[in-house]
Amino acid sequence: MKKTVLVSGGAGYIGSHVTVELLQAGYEVVVADNMSNCDSTCFEGVRKITGRDDLKLNIVDFCDKARVEELFSEYKMDALIHFAAFKAVGESVADPLKYYGNNLESFVNVIGAAHRHGLHNILFSSSATVYGQVEDLPVTEKTPRLPATSPYGNTKQICEDILRDCTSAYKDIKGIALRYFNPIGAHPSALIGELPRGVPNNLVPFITQTAVGKRECLSIFGNDYPTPDGTCLRDYIDIVDLAKAHVAAVSRMLDGKMEADYEIFNVGTGRPVSVQELVDTFEKVNGLKLNCKIAPRRDGDVTAIWADTALAGEKLGWKATRELSDTLKSAWEWEKHIAGK
Ligand code: UDP
């Protein structure tokens, strides 16, 4: 019998890539999304890539308890991957109640329904933002979390704690938090990728939108950081590699391989890349020149962060494999695809 995984937020950027990898690994997937931050482009892409024209898009707002209950009554599911959340850092600072309301309530609701309906395996999409600016790099899963610098980051910390507490109180529940570094790129088919609404905050969508002519000029936020070239260092993880980490984590839960009720894994490459290096690589591999300028530092940016990925390697048998150059080619192919070029 195929095991079934509920993917909340399954029509979004990460959720759609994870759905593809789960289906290709032989899992059945229940895709659920309230479509508040995406249209059906990626969901249609998932259907095309996997040839699953029958795959259903369940419209579910995870803050709506009755609707969540209905979903759990409709499907028998073995694991949950929870993505459904708001994710704009700046907006969370301007409207914290929106973020605490939505991101916490939806998670509490879905764990409650999972518990009542006998779904015991829960994977939470966390973030490297929970670490803040760490002195000792790279960060391991044991590196203490620092106080969050935004309500968005705080919801990631609180949701990790909710999951940890539930796994300790309700003995049948097992949980894994995956802490993503900087997910970038698109599926090699160019049928799914990131579709930011409005002006992108993240570096790679801003680069591709500048390259395609949607934005006039890329600003590099600061070149006076204490790093080799003066720009910030991050750990950019390919979206398909990232999606595969979810399959490995779900298998670990469903195959009874967990060594504790609650586990945490960093999902990154382990390689720091500077903003300037990323821009240069994008230009080189795609054979184009970006209009870009050095701008002042952006508030809230940490100088440098990258992952120690040894634990994921050892326990999940997972590591990032795609070259940065291929990831940046895929990001550009996707941007051209959505621009109809
Ligand atoms: N960045 C930049 N210009 C942009 C967007 C981002 O220079 O238009 C830099 C940002 O300062 C950071 C890095 O790119 O050093 C990654 O930023 P992003 O917002 O993608 O991810 P974050 O690490 O902040 O979550």
Image (spheres, grey):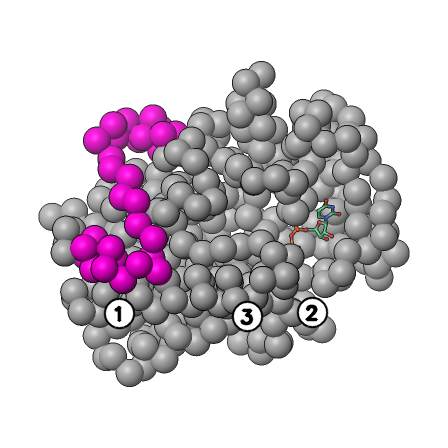
Give residue 160's position: percent from left, percent from top. 44, 71
Front in this rendered view, residue 40 or 202: 40
Image height check: is 144 above or below 250?
below
State the mark number for residue 154: 3
Q: Secondary structure at mark 3?
A: helix
Residue shown at 45%/40% (left/top)? 38
Residue named by callout 2? 133
Residue named by callout 1? 112
Range shown magenta: 44-72
Earlier residue among tags 3 and 2: 2
- In the drawing, does residue 52 fall left or right of residue 286? left
Earlier residue among tags 1 and 2: 1
**Would residue 69 be visible to someone looking at this image?**
yes
Residue kind at label 3, given as amino acid type: Asn
Q: Secondary structure at mark 2?
A: loop
At label 3, counting other C-alpha atoms closer than 10 Å, the crowd grade (few under 14, some 14-19, many 20 or more) is: some
Earlier residue among tags 1 and 3: 1
Q: Tell me the quarter of the picture where residue 111 sits.
A: bottom left
Q: Is residue 70 magenta?
A: yes
Residue kind at label 2, given as amino acid type: Gln
Residue kind at label 1, given as amino acid type: Gly
